[in-house]
Image (tube, rainbow, N blue to C red):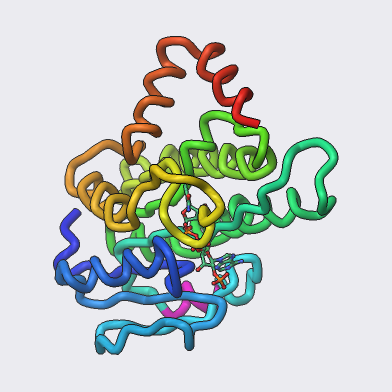
C-alpha cells in the first residue's frame, strides 16, 4: 500500500519506534495520523494532520472508543509493547509475565478485533510490531519471548482470517532497537528509522513477515537451517 493519503493509527506513539512511525508517516504524505498514547500530551508533533488519542491497549473500553473515533483508518500499527526483563524461573516480579501477556498479546488482540471492521470496509493493512524474540527464547527475558511468540501466532491467525478481504497483516521482527526498552543492551542496535523504513518498504510490496537487520535475518535463516543449534546458541546468552 502507498503511505501517501493513508490514514494511520499508531499505538505507543509518544516515544521510541512509535514516535518514529509518526514522523515518517507524516513526511511521506499520510493524510491523517492518529497518534495514540497512554499520556497523549507527551506527543510533541504540531502537525495539523495529527490526532492525539488517549489509549491504554489493556483497557477494552479505551480500545473500543479509539476504534469508534478512527473509522477512516487504512493502516493500523500495533506498536505498543513492554519488556519486563524477567526470566521464566525465579522471577523478581511474579506478575510480570502476566503483564507482558496483557499488553503484547491480549492488548494487541483487542486492537485487531476492534479495528478489523473499519479496515475491511476501507481496505488497508495491520502491522504488528513483534520481535525476533517471537522466534527464539533468550533466557534473560524469557517471559517477553513467550508473549511475543503469542503475538506472532495472533498475527498469523488474523492474517488468515482477513485473507481475501482487502487487508494485509504484517508481522515485524526486529533485533534490538536503540530505544528506552533496550537502553541496558550494548551495541549493535538498530536505529528507529531502520525499523520504520523496513516496515514501510514491506507494506509497498514486500513480505508479510519482516526481519529487520542482520541479526534477525540471521536467526530466521539459522532456525530454517539448524533449528536446535540456533536455539542452543540463544540459550547460552544468559
Ligand atoms: N527496543 C527494542 O530493542 C525492541 C526490539 C524488538 C521489538 N521491539 C518492539 O518495538 C515496539 C516499540 O518499542 P520501543 O522500542 O519503542 O520501546 P519503548 O521506547 O519502551 O516504547 C514502548 C511504547 O509502548 C507504550 N506502551 C506500553 N504499554 C502500553 C499500554 N498498555 N498501552 C499503550 N501503550 C503502551 C509505551 O507507552 P508509555 O510511554 O506510556 O510507557 C511506549 O510508547 C514494542 O512492541 C517492542 O516490543 C523493541
Most extreme residue toward the front is 186
Image-based side of 27 in relation to 149, left or right: left
- Residue 158 placed where, x, y %? 47, 44
Majority secondary structure of magenta residues: helix
Please state if 232 lies on the left or on the right of 3 as rendered: right
Q: Which quadrant of the figure has residue 44?
A: bottom left
What stretch of residues is rendered in magenta? 64-69
95 with respect to 73 (left or right): right
Tell me the residue at 67%/33% (across/down): 139
In this rendering, is residue 143 above or below 138? below
Closer to the camera in the image, 120 or 139:
139
Q: Is residue 35 magenta?
A: no
Residue 41 spot, x, y in % from top left: 48, 88
Q: How many marks?
A: 0
Q: Nearer the viewer, residue 87 or 79?
A: 87
Q: Residue at x 64, y 38 (%)?
A: 146
Q: Residue at x 31, y 42 (%)?
A: 164
Determine which quarter of the picture holds residue 73: bottom left
Residue 185: x and y, percent?
52, 47
Q: Quadrant of the C terminus?
A: top right
Horizontal arrangement in the rendering, residue 28 relative to residue 154 (left or right): left
Residue 28 at what x, y percent from top left? 16, 67
Q: Nearer the viewer, residue 67 or 186?
A: 186
Q: Is residue 43 above or below residue 72?
A: below
Amino acid at each position: 500500500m502507498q503511505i501517501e493519503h493513508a490514514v494511520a493509527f499508531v499505538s505507543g506513539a509518544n516515544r521510541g519506534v512509535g514516535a518514529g512511525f509518526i514522523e515518517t508517516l507524516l513526511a511521506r504524505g499520510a493524510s491523517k495520523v492518529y497518534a495514540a498514547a497512554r499520556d497523549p500530551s507527551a506527543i510533541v508533533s504540531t502537525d495539523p494532520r495529527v490526532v492525539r488519542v488517549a489509549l491504554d491497549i489493556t483497557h477494552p473500553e479505551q480500545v473500543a472508543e479509539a476504534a469508534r473515533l478512527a473509522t477512516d483508518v487504512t493502516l493500523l500499527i500495533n506498536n505498543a509493547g513492554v519488556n519486563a526483563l524477567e526470566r521464566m524461573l525465579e522471577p523478581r516480579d511474579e506478575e510480570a509475565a502476566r503483564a507482558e501477556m496483557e499488553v503484547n498479546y491480549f492488548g494487541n488482540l483487542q486492537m485487531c478485533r476492534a479495528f478489523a471492521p473499519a479496515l475491511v470496509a476501507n481496505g488497508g493493512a495491520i502491522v504488528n510490531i513483534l520481535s525476533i524474540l517471537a522466534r527464539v527464547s533468550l533466557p534473560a527475558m524469557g517471559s517477553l519471548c513467550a508473549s511475543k511468540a503469542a503475538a506472532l501466532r495472533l498475527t498469523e491467525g488474523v492474517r488468515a482470517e482477513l485473507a481475501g478481504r482487502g487487508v494485509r497483516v504484517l508481522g515485524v521482527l526486529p533485533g534490538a532497537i536503540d530505544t528506552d526498552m533496550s537502553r541496558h543492551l550494548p551495541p549493535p542496535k538498530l536505529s528507529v528509522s531502520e525499523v520504520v523504513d523496513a516496515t514501510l518498504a514491506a507494506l509497498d510490496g514486500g513480505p508479510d513477515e519482516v526481519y529487520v537487520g542482520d541479526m534477525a535475518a540471521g536467526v530466521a535463516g539459522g532456525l530454517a537451517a539448524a533449528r536446535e543449534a540456533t536455539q542452543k546458541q540463544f540459550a547460552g546468552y544468559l
